[in-house]
Image (cartoon, rainbow, N blue to C red):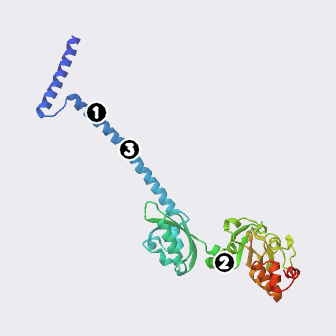
């Protein structure tokens, strides 16, 4: 009885499959029932995959929203002043600290050009820096005076371009008091230009007597590149120093050694030294002084010098007698002592004496 029931069910399933197959053929649908089942299974699999992708996208959206909230909180609530600028300098965003620095409400700053708040003295420098910011992604720093309704303050502006946008985020920090403690810093560019173009050689060294920097004139007068003199001791540059009378300088009497030991300034001391790869003395007038920072911690020493070799040789030449000058000129031309004696009508011994 049970076998008959099983055979009946199989027969009904077979007839059902055949009826579906015949019905599909009448409708003109290609394929078999097995193929349709495979398609249905494939669609169900794709449906499951799409649902997984939907879940992943939802998780990603939630993560992005969380990051956006964190960024907004950091930007808006940070104690540091932040601005977002476009390449024209228009303020697109500003946080609360930034608006407070300007002494204005945030909505009054949006779409304003930062140029109108920068004092004219710094405008050219700011525009150059802004151009560099948007030409690359490196960080740029500039200090300028920020004009407010009631007063003017000095701020440090640090900005960097957003890589995927034509905007930059800038932080501003008030440095008015810091600037006031360095009254000469605003003229730093002018001083640097003077130092670089002055004809006197200027060398800056540390307390160890090693060279830290040198101007163009110093490098030209010494005939050395900066790499050849950087971190080199002064005594290695001005070697075998002598007084004008030929007496050798004692180490402790050298002007730059004195200033290193006592911080006392010395001016216009003449000394001769033998340059590297030379056998002749070069004569210089040298001065030295200590340069102390405002906090009195960073002490450096400035040494200025001028080459007076040509001038000194000219003075020595003028001390010669007429006959000595005649002998000197012929020696320079390469004439022998016998030839000079014959031309001048004097003995070779006299030539030796003059020489």
**For numbered disc 3, what is the local secondary structure?**
helix
* Residue under label 1: 41
Q: Position of residue 265 (x, y in %)?
A: 79, 78
The answer to whether residue 10 is left or right of residue 175 is left
**For numbered disc 1, what is the local secondary structure?**
helix
Give the image quarter of residue 354: bottom right
| Residue closer to the observer: 332 or 320 | 332
Mark 2 closeness class: few <14, some 14–19, many ≥20 residues within 10 Å: some
* Residue under label 3: 55
How far separated are the C-alphas under marks 3 and 2? Answer: 67 Å
Q: Position of residue 217 (x, y in %)?
A: 67, 76
In the rendered view, tell whether residue 156 sits above or below residue 12: below
Q: Residue at x 87, y 71 (%)?
A: 250
Q: Quadrant of the C terminus?
A: bottom right
* Residue under label 2: 195
Q: Residue at x 43, y 53 (%)?
A: 64
Residue 294 visible to an observer of this rendering:
no
């Amino acid at each position: 009885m049970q076998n008959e029931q099983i055979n009946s069910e199989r027969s009904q399933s077979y007839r059902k499959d055949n009826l579906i197959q015949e019905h599909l053929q009448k409708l003109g649908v290609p394929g078999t029932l097995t193929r349709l089942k495979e398609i249905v299974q494939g669609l169900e699999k794709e449906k499951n995959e799409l649902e997984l992708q939907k879940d992943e996208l939802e998780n990603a959206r939630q993560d992005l929203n969380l990051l956006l909230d964190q960024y907004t909180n950091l930007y808006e609530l940070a104690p540091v002043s932040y601005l977002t600028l476009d390449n024209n300098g228009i303020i697109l965003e500003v946080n609360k600290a930034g608006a407070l620095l300007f002494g204005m409400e945030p909505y009054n700053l949006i779409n304003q050009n930062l140029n109108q708040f920068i004092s004219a003295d710094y405008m050219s420098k700011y525009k150059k820096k802004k151009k560099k910011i948007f030409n690359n992604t490196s960080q740029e720093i500039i200090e300028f005076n920020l004009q407010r309704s009631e007063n003017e303050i000095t701020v440090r502006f640090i900005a960097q371009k957003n890589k995927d946008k034509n905007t930059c985020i800038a932080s501003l920090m008030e440095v008015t008091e810091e600037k006031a403690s360095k009254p000469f810093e605003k003229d730093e560019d002018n001083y640097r230009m003077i130092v670089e173009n002055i004809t006197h050689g200027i060398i800056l060294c540390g307390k160890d007597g090693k060279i830290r920097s040198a101007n163009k004139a110093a490098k030209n007068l010494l005939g050395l590149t900066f790499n050849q003199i950087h971190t080199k001791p002064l005594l290695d540059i001005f070697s075998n120093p002598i007084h004008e009378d030929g007496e050798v300088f004692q180490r402790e009497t050298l002007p730059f050694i004195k200033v290193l030991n006592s911080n006392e300034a010395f001016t216009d001391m003449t000394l001769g030294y033998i340059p590297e790869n030379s056998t002749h003395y070069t004569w210089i007038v040298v001065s030295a002084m200590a340069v102390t920072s405002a906090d009195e911690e960073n002490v450096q020493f400035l040494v200025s010098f001028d080459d007076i070799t040509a001038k000194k040789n000219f003075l020595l030449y003028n001390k010669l007698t007429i006959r000595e000058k005649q002998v000197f000129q012929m020696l320079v031309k390469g004439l022998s002592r016998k030839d000079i004696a014959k031309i001048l009508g004097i003995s070779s011994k006299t030539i030796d004496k003059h020489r």
